[in-house]
Structures are given as structure tokens and as C-alpha cells.
Image (cartoon, rainbow, N blue to C red):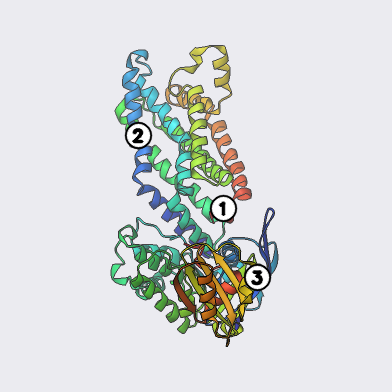
Amino acid sequence: MTILEVKNLTKEFKDQKAVQGISFELYSGEILGLLGPNGAGKSTTINMLSMMMHGDDGEIYFHGKRVGNHKNLYKRQLGIVPQDIAIYEEITAEANVMFFASLYGLKGPELIQSVHRALDFVGLLDKKTRKPKTFSGGMKRRLNIACAIAHEPEILIMDEPTVGIDPQSRKHILQSIKQLKEQGTSVIYTTHYMEEVEEVATRVVIMDHGKVIANGTKEALKEELEEEKLYEIVVDQELGLLGDEWYEIEGVKQVDMEGTCIRIATVKGIENLDKIISFLIDKGVRIQNITSLSQSLEMVFLKLTGRRLRDEGE
Amino acid sequence: MRSIRGFQVVIRRDVINLVTNPVLLMSNTIFPLVLMIVLGYLTEGMYGNEVTSYQYYGLTMLIFMSLNVSITAANSFMENRIRRSNLRILYAPISRSIVYLSKMIATFIFTTACSYLLVLCIYLMFGLPSKGFTWFYFMLILTGLNLFAATLGVLMCCIFKSEEVSNQLLSIVNYSLAIVSGLFFPWDGLGRVAEWISMISPVKWVAEATFRVIYDHDLAFVLPTLGICIVGTLLLLIGCHRLFNEEDYI
């Protein structure tokens, strides 16, 4: 069932087209990974979805109704985990969640139950009386999530919720997201960590230059690239321009060079690694490392955007 | 109903944030009191017995503190750590106006409580003439000025989208107004031009109204002062409503 439908959403800033007529859907109970290199338009899209920014054109439909006409109804069912931790440092974890949950109309015993449920969900119930200023970065991130889910939203938008945290907290957060999905919450998830998307996302939307350039399940997107193999070779010196020489090697389809790192896409089924190595040795360079990249979302992303997800994100 | 409850919840939170901020608490209570005592002590010989230096600076520093309510408002509205939490308030299904209105009202409540506390202090410490109703009118003037200044601080943030810029500008404006209105020293004595400049400062008239109420029991300036503060506040609020933009918080 479609819970959220984005149609032809557009946003321009002065002379820059941040989002150019994007369309996608969010289905009930799925985790949608929204990916893209920096400047792809993800944040602008999230800001428009969270009603913090008005689009220039296009519509967002929540359960088939235009959100512009039912703004509060939509916002009531929306939980947002912003990239920056948005909590009060000076009041207890419980008071934080209670304050934000009460803005959604919760009160009395229902409010207290919801707050405790949210804190328990993120593993902070036993620390409810502590102030966030005494928390680690990971605990603050978890409290940031608790503040967004206490009112039990149908849709949860998470904007890089695991930035700069310890592995234990990251694991906890990823587990929580999967658990939310099991409970029927639909999640839009952005991150710079492809392994997280591989782990939690059921479907992926890839954006670049303000446009949706791929939309589908992880499996479907990977299948699209299965006719290729990708090698990443690190050499000891920059090769300079070699022009068409690369393409004289049988099977080589595309070569991208970044400094001393060479990424070579070759036709699947043609064994040409020995020829590639010989070619490099003939050019007088020493090979320092060779990686055969298996079919992954990272490869899909790389092929579509020409960049790794974390190239500019870190 | 949900919006009204949301409004109450946010105001309560904002008041608590202000009260628990040691810097703002000090700058609205201890700092003006110390300023009154220091200036009063330093200029003791320059004032007579009818209006002592302590009484003079007690009253003028209260007015100066009221002007600086605008800076407290800017802090409560866009201070970095508050700003991020405000973003989450904007995510909630409540009116966007609640964000700036709550900051303005919370600042007004907090600073007015501080002002009343200081009024009590100067009344007890500096031997000001006592006549119940005159103090009531004086507090009314301060209340009106606090309301105006709180709204001004919020409007400046709506215009400049930054606490730092707003505070820098407000500091310049507040100190300039305080100086030309004679809150720190008798500016009028610097000549005719200075006197003329002083006449066009609204703060000069607030000080005039204050001294007339306290020492002459003359209420003539009270209503006009209050009226101007209230009308000014309403105009500034219209400005806030037009200029406040959720996108500024992103």
C-alpha cells in the first residue's frame, strides 16, 4: 500500500535547481534508502517532506491526500530524526521525550507510557533521569530517535542517524530501525554508509543532480549491472592520460582514474585481469593493490553517479 | 485545542530554559544590581539628597535592563543549542507562529519577573519615596517596555536569522539610546545639540515618565508610554509574522 507519494517535486534556489521534478513512493512498512552524493538534493527533498521547506512545484500525497491541505494530519503521523541532534542538553532524557511527544497531543498516562516505550526502544529507559550532556554521542543519537518516535508516527524520516557514533550504538540503531519496520512503520533513511543501506533498506532511491536516477529494490538495481565486473587497482604513481589504449584490452568497457586509483569495468565472462596487469606493468607502474568488487549497491551507486557514497560525505 | 496546549507546553519549556540559563539569569538580576551600586557609589558626590545617585541609577539601570530584554529575547530565540530544538518544535503539528510567540512571551515573563525583583531591591536598598500607586505605575511602564523589547529582539532574529548579528546590532542600539537618553550620565548637559538628540530618543521619555511618576506622582506620561509600547509591540509582531520562515532554521 502506498503511504506517501511524491510527484514531480521541484525546488530552486536562486539560479540552482536543487530538486528537479522528482517522483517516488513510500510503501507501508518498508525502509526506503534515499541515497546520493553531496549536493544531490537529498536534504532539500527531506526538508520538503518534513514540511520545513515549500516546493516550487509538485505535490506530496499522504494516503492519497495532498499534504498541503492536511498539513497537521500529515505532521501528526511524521517522525523526523534530523542529522543534527535536536534535544535539550540541560533536562533529563525523559523530560526531553516528554516535551516533544506532548507537542503531538499526548498527555497524562498515555504520554508517560509512550515516553517510556520510546526510551525503552532505544535502550535508554534505565538512563531516563540522566541529562543528555552526560551522554556519549551514540546515546544522544538514540535519544534523538526516541524524541521522533514517541508519538508512534506512521512515517519516520531519518537523516543520517548514525553519523559519528560508536559501533555498538550503530548496531542498536540499525536493529531498532528493523524493529520499527516489523511494527509497520515506514522509514525513509539517508546515510553515507552503504553497508547500512545494504543491511536495512528494502528499496533504494538514488538521486544525483536533483533527479532520481534509480529507483527499485536492492536486488533489482544490482541485477541491472550484472553484465559487468569491476576491478579497483591501486598503483604507485599516476598514469596520466592513456586515451584509447585501455580499450584495446578485450572486454574493458569503462576506465575511471582518480589519482593512483583505477576503476575498470569489464564485460562479465571475459577473463582479462592478466591482460590488465600486463598492461600496467608495461607502463612501468607497480601494482600495490587489486580489488575485485563484487556486485553491491556501492557498485550500482558508483556506476550511476561516478562517485562512491562516502567520497564527499566524510 | 492541540495548538493551545502545544503553545502552553512550549512557553513553559522556554521559561524554564531561560531560568536555568545562568548567564541570562545573572545578566537580568545580579549584573544590573551591581551596575546600580557601582555607578551610584562612583557618582555619589554629584547628586543631591532629593534624588541620590543610588536612586537615579537604580531607576535608570532598570530602564536600561528593560532595553536589554531584546538581547535576552534574541538569545532565547536563536541561541545555537536552542535553535536545533526549535527545529524539532517546527516538525510538530502546531502553528509555526508558536515558535516566535513563545520565545517572546517566555522572555517577557522571565525578564518582567526579574525586573519586579529588582524594583523590590532598589525600593528596599536605595530609600526611594514610597507611595504605593506610583510604584504600580512605574512597574506598568517597565512591563510595557519589556514587552516591546522582547518583541524587538525576536523580530531582529526574524530579520537577520542569527543571534550573533541581532545581539551586536541590539547592543549598539541599546547603548546608544541609553547614552543619549541620559541613563548613564546627564547627556543634556553636553549642549543644545545633545539635548535635541536626547529629545528624539523614546527612552528619554520613558525615563522622564519614570521620574515624574516616582518623584512627582505625575501620571501624565504613563498612558502614552504604555500605549506606544503596546502599539509598537503589535507592529513588531506583524513584522515577525511576515518575516518568520521555517526554512531559516534548517
**Going from the N terminus, do you reach mark 2 or mark 1 first?**
2
Q: Chain of mark 1?
A: B
- Secondary structure of the residue carrying tag 1 is helix
Question: Which circle, 3 or 1, is nearer the viewer?
Answer: 3
Which label sits on residue A244? 3
Decide: few, some or many residues near mark 3? Use Cα within 10 Å; few <14, some 14-19, many ≥20: few
Q: Looking at the picture, which amino acid does disc 2 mark?
A: Phe
- Chain bearing mark 3: A
Q: Which label belongs to residue B31?
A: 2
Q: CA distance from mark 2 to mark 1?
A: 32 Å
Q: Give the residue type that dot 3 points to.
A: Asp
Please name the residue that numbered disc 1 is placed on.
B248
- Mark 3 or 2: in front is 3
**Residue B52 at x, y percent in the picture:** 35, 19
**Residue that appears at 52% across and 54% down:** B99
At 55% from the left and 85% from the top, the residue drawn is: A271
- Looking at the rendered image, the quarter that the C terminus of chain B falls into is bottom right
Alpha carbon separation for disc pair 3 and 1: 50 Å
Label 2 near label 3: C-beta < 8 Å? Answer: no
